[in-house]
Image: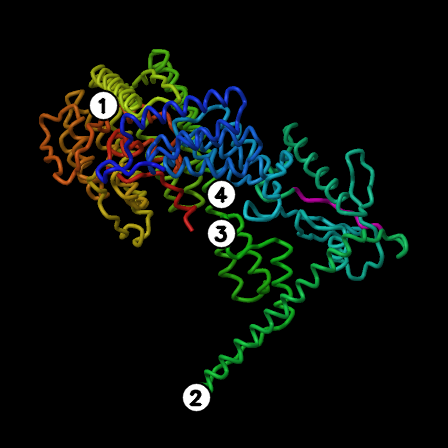
C-alpha cells in the first residue's frame, strides 16, 4: 500500500520511494526484453502501487504494462492500461499509438482512428502514424479489407454495424428489359431480402432470376449472400480500376459502396433459386421482430392517444386527435432496421443531408411541407462541399509550408523559395474562395484565408526562422530533464527568432503591409460570419494558477478563437514594424485589446509583452498576485509563431498555427492560462 503523503505534495515521491520505483521500472524493462511479460507486468504493478495518483510516472508504468499485454495478445486489457495512462497524461503520444493498435486488433476501427488522429495533430506526427490513419480510413470506407478481428476482441468487424460505425449502404440498379429501378439496401442484406425487395420494385414482372456481370463479362446468378458480396467486390474493383487508370469514376465516400448493377432475367417459377434455409430463417426472425416492435409502438401510440383524450375531457378543452396509420409505423421500423439507423448516434453532415432529403421524398413531392426539408438538405450538402474545398486548400498550404521549412533548414535564400510558395498559396486561395462561393458565411474558409495572407506577409518581409534541433531524451527521462530540455529548446528558438528579426529590411517590410491588412480584414469578416448568439457567448477568464493546479477549462468558442488569431497577427505585425523602424505601438495596443476581449489570462498577456522586442517601451501590467508559486516558464514568442508557421491553416488545426500568446496556449509548459484552442470547423458543430 502506498504511503500517505502530505496535502502539500500529493503527486510527489520522496527520494527513497523514487529510487525504489526507478529500480522496479528498470527490472520490468529487463524482464520485458527477455520476453517474460507476465513477470514484467507484476513488477510494473508493484511500482504503480508506490506512485501517487496523478504523477507522471504512473502514465509511463501503465503504458509499459500495456506493451506486455499487447505481446500476450490481450488487446482489450491493453486498451484499459493505455486509457489509465492517458487519464494521467491525456496527450501521451506513446499510449495513444499503442491504444490505437489495440483497438484495431479488436475491430474498434473508429476508436483506433480517433487515437491516431490525435497523434497526427501533435508534434509527434510521423510517416508511420500518417500511414496508419490513411489505412484505417481506407478500411472504414471499404477500399481495403480489414484484418481478422482478434479472438479476445468485441466481435465487431470493420464496416459492420454497432458502436464503432454505421452499416455500409449500397444502391442496386435493377434492370428488367429497358426499365431500371433503384433499390437501397444494407451491406449485410441476405439473398432472401434482396429478392423480396426487387419483387416489390417490379410487382408485375412475374418470376425472374437475379444476375450480375462479373469481370469476364459473364452474367452470374445470385443464389445466396456470398454471391451478393462477390457482386459488391466486383463493383468496388471496377471503380478502383477506373480511378487508377484516370477514368471518371467517383471516389468512394465513407459508409457507401458503388452502385451494384443487377439484371432481372425472366424464367419459370421452378427455376428461381430459392433462398438458403438459414437465410430464410433469419428473414423470418427479423420479420417477427419488426412485427413485435410495430405492435409495441402501436400500443404505445394508442395508450398516449387515450391519455391525451382523457386529459382533454377532464379539462373540457376540445382537442384534435391524430390517428397514426399502421403502415407508417411499419415503414418507420423497416427503414430503421434496413439502414441501421441508431437514433442516439449523431450523424455526420452527409447523413443529415440524406435524411432531410429522404424526409422530403416521403412527405410527397407535391406537398408544401416537403420544400423546407429540401432546403435544409441543400444547406447541409453545401456545407459538406465547402468543408471539402477548404480541406483541399489546406493541402496546398501544407505544401507551401513544407517548402518554407526546407528553405529555412537548408539556409537557402528566401527569394528562391518564394515563387513556389506563392504558386501554392494561389491554388489554396482558389479553393478557399470556392468554399465561400458555396457557403458565404463559412467561418473555416475565412480564417484559412486570413492565415494564408498572414504567412505571405511574413514571407514578403523576409521573416524566416530556422527551427533549432530538438534535443533527444530517453524514454524514461525524469521531469527535471524534460523541463531543462524544454527550456533549452525555447531559448534556442527565441535566439533564432531574434536573429531573423535583426535581418529584416525596411523595403521588405513595406511589401508585407498589404498582406497584413488583407489578413486583418479577413479576421474581421470571420467575426461578422458568426451568429449573434455565438458572439454573445461568454467564457470565464483563464485562471491565473499554474496549469497543473488549475481545473479543466471550458473550450474557447469560435468568437474567442478568432479574436486570439487576430491578436496574434497584430502582435507579429508589431514585431516586424519595430524591427524595421515602423510605427509598432498602435498594433501591440490593439493586439492586447483583442486578447483581453477573448478572455485570455492577464499573466499570459504579460508574458507575451515581456517577450516583445520593444518591451522597455510598453506599459506592462504587474504580475497577478493570485498566481501560486509558478515555476518560471518561457512565454510565447515570435519564434514560437515562426516554428508553427509550417502547419496547415485548417480550422481543425488553426490554433496550432496561431502566433504570439495563442501559440503559447498550445503547450502548457511555455505559457499557462490561455484557453486551449483546437477549433473544430464551425460547420461541423452540431
Q: Of marks 3 and 2, which one's residue comes earlier in the chain?
A: 2
Disc number placed over residue 385 in the picture, else none: 4
Image spot of residue 127 (x, y percent): 49, 23
User: Mark 1 = which residue?
Assistant: 510
For marks 3 and 1, give the one nearer the viewer: 3
How many residues crowd mark 3 within 10 Å: few (<14), some (14–19), many (20+)?
Answer: few
For marks 4 and 3, give the one nearer the viewer: 3
Give the quadrant of residue 444: top left
For marks 1 and 4, give the one nearer the viewer: 4
Q: Of marks 3 and 1, which one's residue comes earlier in the chain?
A: 3
The range drawn in magenta is 258-265
Q: CA distance from mark 4 to mark 3?
A: 20 Å
Q: Of marks 4 and 3, which one's residue comes earlier in the chain?
A: 3
User: Mark 3 = which residue?
Assistant: 346
Q: CA distance from mark 3 to mark 2?
A: 41 Å
Q: CA distance from mark 3 to mark 1?
A: 50 Å
The reply to whether the C-beta atoms of the residues labelled 3 and 1 are less than 8 Å apart is no
Is residue 545 shown left or right of residue 177?
Answer: left
User: Mark 2 = which residue?
Assistant: 316
Q: CA distance from mark 1 to mark 2?
A: 79 Å
The reply to whether the C-beta atoms of the residues labelled 4 and 2 are less than 8 Å apart is no
Residue nearest the observer in this picture, 300 or 456: 300
For marks 1 and 2, give the one nearer the viewer: 2
Amino acid at each position: 500500500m502506498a504511503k500517505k503523503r502530505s496535502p502539500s505534495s500529493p503527486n510527489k515521491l520522496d527520494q527513497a520511494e523514487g529510487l525504489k520505483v526507478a529500480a522496479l521500472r528498470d527490472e520490468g524493462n529487463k524482464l520485458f526484453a527477455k520476453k517474460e511479460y507476465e513477470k514484467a507486468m507484476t513488477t510494473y504493478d508493484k511500482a504503480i502501487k508506490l506512485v501517487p495518483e496523478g504523477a507522471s510516472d504512473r502514465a509511463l508504468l501503465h503504458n509499459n504494462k500495456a506493451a506486455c499485454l499487447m505481446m500476450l495478445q490481450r488487446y482489450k486489457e491493453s486498451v484499459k492500461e493505455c486509457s489509465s495512462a492517458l487519464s494521467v497524461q491525456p496527450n501521451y503520444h506513446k499510449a495513444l499509438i499503442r491504444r490505437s493498435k489495440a483497438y484495431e486488433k479488436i475491430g474498434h476501427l473508429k476508436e483506433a482512428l480517433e487515437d491516431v488522429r490525435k497523434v497526427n495533430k501533435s508534434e509527434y506526427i510521423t510517416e508511420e502514424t500518417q500511414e496508419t490513419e490513411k489505412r484505417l480510413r481506407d478500411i472504414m470506407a471499404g477500399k481495403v479489407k480489414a484484418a481478422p478481428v482478434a479472438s479476445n476482441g468485441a466481435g465487431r468487424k470493420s464496416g459492420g454495424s454497432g458502436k464503432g460505425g454505421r452499416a455500409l449502404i449500397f444502391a442496386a440498379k435493377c434492370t428488367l428489359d429497358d426499365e431500371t429501378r433503384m433499390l437501397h439496401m444494407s451491406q449485410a442484406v441476405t439473398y432472401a431480402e434482396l429478392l423480396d425487395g426487387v419483387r416489390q420494385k417490379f410487382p408485375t414482372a412475374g418470376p425472374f432470376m437475379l444476375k450480375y456481370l462479373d469481370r469476364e463479362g459473364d452474367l452470374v446468378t445470385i443464389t445466396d449472400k456470398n454471391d451478393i458480396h462477390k457482386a459488391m467486390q466486383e463493383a468496388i474493383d471496377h471503380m478502383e480500376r477506373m480511378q487508377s487508370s484516370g477514368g471518371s469514376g467517383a471516389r468512394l465516400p465513407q459508409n457507401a459502396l458503388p452502385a451494384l448493377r443487377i439484371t432481372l432475367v425472366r424464367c419459370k417459377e421452378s427455376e428461381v433459386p430459392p433462398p438458403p434455409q438459414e437465410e430464410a430463417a433469419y428473414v423470418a426472425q427479423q420479420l417477427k421482430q419488426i412485427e413485435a416492435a410495430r405492435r409495441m409502438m402501436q400500443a404505445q401510440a394508442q395508450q398516449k392517444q387515450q391519455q391525451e383524450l382523457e386529459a382533454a375531457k377532464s379539462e373540457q378543452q376540445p382537442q384534435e386527435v391524430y390517428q397514426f396509420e399502421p403502415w407508417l409505423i411499419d415503414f418507420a421500423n423497416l427503414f430503421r432496421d434496413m439502414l441501421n439507423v441508431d437514433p442516439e448516434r449523431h450523424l455526420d453532415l452527409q447523413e443529415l443531408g440524406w435524411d432531410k432529403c429522404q424526409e422530403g421524398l416521403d412527405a410527397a413531392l407535391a406537398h408544401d411541407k416537403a420544400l423546407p426539408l429540401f432546403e435544409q438538405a441543400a444547406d447541409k450538402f453545401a456545407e459538406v462541399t465547402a468543408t471539402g474545398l477548404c480541406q483541399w486548400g489546406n493541402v496546398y498550404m501544407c505544401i507551401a509550408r513544407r517548402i518554407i521549412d526546407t528553405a529555412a533548414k537548408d539556409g537557402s535564400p528566401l527569394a528562391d523559395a518564394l515563387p513556389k510558395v506563392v504558386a501554392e498559396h494561389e491554388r489554396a486561395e482558389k479553393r478557399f474562395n470556392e468554399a465561400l462561393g458555396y457557403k458565404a458565411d463559412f467561418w473555416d474558409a475565412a480564417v484559412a484565408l486570413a492565415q494564408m495572407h498572414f504567412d505571405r506577409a511574413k514571407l514578403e518581409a523576409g521573416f524566416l526562422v530556422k527551427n533549432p534541433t530538438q534535443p533527444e531524451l530517453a524514454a524514461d527521462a525524469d521531469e527535471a530533464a524534460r523541463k531543462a530540455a524544454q527550456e533549452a529548446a525555447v531559448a534556442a528558438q527565441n535566439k533564432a527568432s531574434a536573429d531573423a528579426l535583426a535581418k529584416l529590411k525596411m523595403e521588405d517590410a513595406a511589401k508585407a503591409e498589404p498582406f497584413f491588412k488583407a489578413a486583418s480584414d479577413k479576421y474581421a469578416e470571420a467575426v461578422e460570419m458568426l451568429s449573434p448568439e455565438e458572439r454573445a457567448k461568454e467564457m470565464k477568464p483563464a485562471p491565473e494558477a499554474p496549469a497543473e493546479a488549475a481545473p479543466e477549462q471550458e473550450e474557447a468558442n469560435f468568437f474567442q478563437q478568432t479574436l486570439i488569431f487576430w491578436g496574434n497577427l497584430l502582435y507579429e505585425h508589431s514585431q516586424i514594424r519595430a524591427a524595421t523602424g515602423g510605427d509598432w505601438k498602435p498594433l501591440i495596443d490593439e493586439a492586447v485589446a483583442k486578447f483581453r476581449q477573448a478572455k485570455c489570462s492577464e499573466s499570459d498577456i504579460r508574458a507575451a509583452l515581456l517577450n516583445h522586442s520593444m518591451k522597455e517601451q510598453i506599459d506592462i501590467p504587474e504580475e497577478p498576485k493570485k498566481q501560486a508559486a509558478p515555476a518560471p516558464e518561457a512565454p510565447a514568442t515570435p519564434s514560437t509563431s515562426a516554428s508553427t508557421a509550417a502547419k496547415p491553416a485548417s480550422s481543425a488545426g488553426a490554433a496550432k498555427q496561431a502566433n504570439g500568446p495563442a501559440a503559447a496556449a498550445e503547450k502548457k509548459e511555455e505559457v499557462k492560462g490561455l484557453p486551449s484552442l483546437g477549433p473544430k470547423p464551425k460547420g461541423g458543430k452540431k
